[in-house]
Image: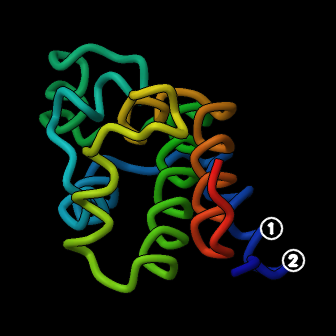
Amino acid sequence: DSVNEEDVLYLINTVRKGINFQRFAAMAKNFPFSTSDWSGFLHISDRTLQRYQKEKKSFDPVASERIIEITLLYKQAFATFGSKEKVDIWLDSHSIALGGAKPKDFLDSTLGIQLIRNELTHIEFGILA
């Protein structure tokens, strides 16, 4: 499930401009993550996240990129598992392949997200860790 070059250029431009809170909120309602989860993923406090909402602020490029990375990972997981329910359960389940951690515990860094994407590829192709 690759992203074409035109889409990548659009995403890069979106990251540079910053995702505004309203757009983030519309995207976030599709995910099983709490406000506290998002605060951790984006390395900002719950209060800062609430202030972004109140002031209708946009996220900086680093946070915007993380939001897009998580969105792309979720799309990959949906393609792998075939349903939102299965993805949501998998994200919150302890994984032997991840040393007993939950996949969602790795969504606070690009390296962690890549690790989870690799794990999804293993699952997709039936490769056990």
Left or right: residue 92 versus residue 122 is: left
Q: In which quarter of the view is residue 43 placed?
A: top left
User: Which residue has dot 1 on it?
Assistant: 9
Q: CA distance from mark 1 to mark 2?
A: 6 Å
Residue 39 to residue 13: above or below: above
Residue drawn at point x = 47 percent, y = 68 percent = 77
Residue 40 to residue 5: above or below: above
Residue drawn at point x = 26 percent, y = 14 percent = 45
Q: At label 1, which amino acid type do we have?
A: Leu
Left or right: residue 93 versus residue 51 is: right
Residue 59 position, x and y percent, is 44, 36
Residue 128 to residue 99: above or below: below
Q: Residues within 10 Å of mark 2 (few under 14, many from 20)?
A: few
User: Which residue has dot 2 on it?
Assistant: 5
Kindly state the secondary structure of the residue where label 1 is placed. Answer: helix
Residue drawn at point x = 61 percent, y = 74 percent = 124
